[in-house]
Amino acid sequence: MSKKVLVLGEAREGALRNVSFEAIAAAKTVSGGGEVVGLLVGDAVQSLAEEMIQYGADRVVTVEHPHLKHYTSDGYGQAFMAVYEQEKPEAVIFGHTANGKDLSPKIASKLGTGLISDVTAIEGEGDDALFVRPIYSGKAFEKVKNKEDLLFFSIRPNNIAPLEKDAGRSGEATSVSVDITNLRTIIKDVVRKSTEGVDLSEAKVVVAGGRGVKSADGFKPLEELANLLGGAVGASRGACDADYCDYSLQIGQTGKVVTPDLYIAAGISGAIQHMAGMSNSKVIVAINKDPEANIFKVADYGIVGDLFEVIPMMIEEIKKVKTN
Ligand code: FAD
């Protein structure tokens, strides 16, 4: 049976996040040829609708309101519900991002339906689709079949490939006016600790440091390596707890979950709580002085050595390759 699928896109600082395009690709897989409708919520998102269409959405609905400039579950919940009632989709897809993790269970509960969260792959298509998701902190995967009338799932960023962008694709973009009322929270402003660099959760390369980095200054070579590779710096909780870096960099069970193409773990022992956030990375390189370190169990390439010797050597070699 074909399904109309509603995909909640996510924008940050005026640009759509990749997870929006990945969600459209997932929508195509489950729609059985049905319509894929993008939804954008914010204070000025109309201009982003075209890109959702170029990535495969058939049309886009936008909800704009000054109170939607910054995400709040109240505001976005009201906007989503208004469009949901209007569109009456048979399937809904969110990104399993910070916002998506907050909003999706609330919406599922409001709609009295189940939620298949944190999907990393879809096997099969249409009504036969099986949703693959990690369980037990990434130690195993389960395959879930939807049995609800409404198919509702969220996808982990960086796992489902987006469709190729087609600049010639066109579709309708309509706006829906929603009276956003009775907000318990209105975010007036967001002050970022750092505006530089690549977003950790969407980075293709992550260079992460642990307690073995030994100080805030010890992160400098990791930053240089990450910059050279066009990636982002991450950290273990050990490094954050020791005040070597900010908690916004923490990867793991109680931090961010990342799935880059390349994850370089330097001076990280490989506690299960850390691995819950990075073990699905496509290629893992571990640098550790201790040959028995647990991180080597998940590493594709292991380097037993001092990170302060190994990382400068990597930087030097990468620079050589880049200049040749
Ligand atoms: P350590 O375990 O101290 O390891 C440091 C490593 O550096 C060692 O293996 C050492 O051999 C190596 N090393 C030292 N010097 C060098 C050098 N010069 N060169 C190369 N290697 C060197 N942790 C997370 O990371 N993320 C989480 O989200 C998280 N959530 C948690 C939730 C709960 C409920 C609990 C209880 C714990 C959580 N933890 C989490 C903490 C986790 O259990 C570990 O304590 C933490 O990951 C250890 O960090 P680490 O590997 O940097 O430090």
Image (tube, rainbow, N blue to C red):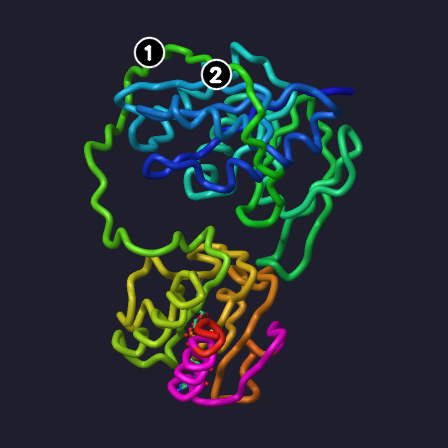
Q: Amino acid at mark 2?
A: Ala
10 Å crowding of disc 2: few (<14), some (14-19), many (20+): many
Question: What segment is highlighted magenta in the picture?
Answer: 297-319
Q: Position of residue 5 (x, y in %)?
A: 62, 23
Measured in 3D between alpha carbons, the distance from the residue under mark 1 to the one under mark 2, in whole angstroms, is 20 Å
Residue 112 visible? The answer is no
- Taking the image as shown, residue 322 lies to the left or right of residue 136, namely left
Q: Position of residue 185 (x, y in %)?
A: 26, 29
**The image quarter in which residue 3 lies:** top right
Residue 235: within the magenta?
no
Numbered disc total: 2
Closest to the observer: 100 or 262?
Answer: 262
Q: Amino acid at mark 1?
A: Asp
Query: In the displayed structure, would residue 205 be above or below residue 129?
Result: below
Helix, strand or loop for disc 2: strand
The N terminus lies in which quarter of the figure?
top right
What residue is disc 2 on? 173
**Which of the two discs, 1 and 2, labels the residue nearer the N terminus?**
2
What residue is disc 1 on? 179
